[in-house]
Image (cartoon, rainbow, N blue to C red):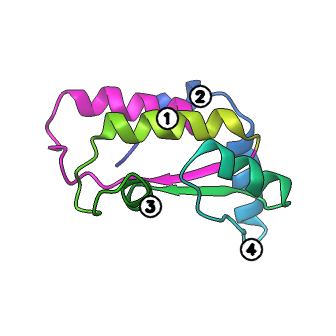
Amino acid sequence: MMIPNALRSVAPQGPRSKLRAAMKGGGIIRAPGVVDPVVARLVEAAGFEAVYMTGGGLSRSLGFPDIGLLTMTEIISHLRFIIRATALPVIADADLLNVDADDPNLAALESQLAYLTR
């Protein structure tokens, strides 16, 4: 999913800029997978540089197979809790298996992601 540059400019800076700087450093960024805020805090306390949330991992943690059963709204809702729980950058992916690229709601979801992934 592409996030328009106009949306990127309004997102607050912070963890995102830390992640970009780390990526430019050329080293390995350790970002363990998390599925909830408690695990995100444990990852932060353990000294990792970032956390990673995947839609597939979230699906499995909720008892669903990774075949696109969760909506983007549900994924963003969980992502919001994880982001609020940690000061670390959060890398997130979410499959768009159940979202049509021409869906007018996609722009709203992209806006939410741009803001959340500050």
Disc 1 element:
helix
Contact (CB < 8 A) between labels 1 and 3?
A: no
Q: Which labelled disc corresponds to residue 57?
A: 3
Contact (CB < 8 A) between labels 3 and 2?
A: no
Q: Is residue 115 above or below residue 36?
A: above
- Residue 4: horizontal and vertical position, in percent? 41, 37
Q: Can residue 4 be spotted in the picture?
A: no
What residue type is disc 3 on? Gly
Contact (CB < 8 A) between labels 2 and 1?
A: yes
User: In the depicted view, which residue is nearer to us: 102 or 62?
Assistant: 62
What residue type is disc 2 on? Ala
- For disc 2, the neighbor class at 10 Å (few under 14, some 14 to 19, many from 20) is some
**Quick one: label 4 or label 3, which is nearer the N terminus?**
4
* Occupied quadrant, residue 64: bottom left
**Quick one: label 2 or label 1, which is nearer the N terminus?**
2
* Occupied quadrant, residue 109: top left
Disc 2 target residue: 11
**Quick one: label 4 or label 1, which is nearer the N terminus?**
4
**Quick one: label 4 or label 2, which is nearer the N terminus?**
2
Disc 1 target residue: 114
Q: Residue at x 44, y 61 (%)?
A: 57
Disc 4 target residue: 26
Mark 3 and mark 2: Cα distance apart in space: 26 Å
What residue type is disc 1 on? Ala
Q: Which residues are magenta?
A: 88-117
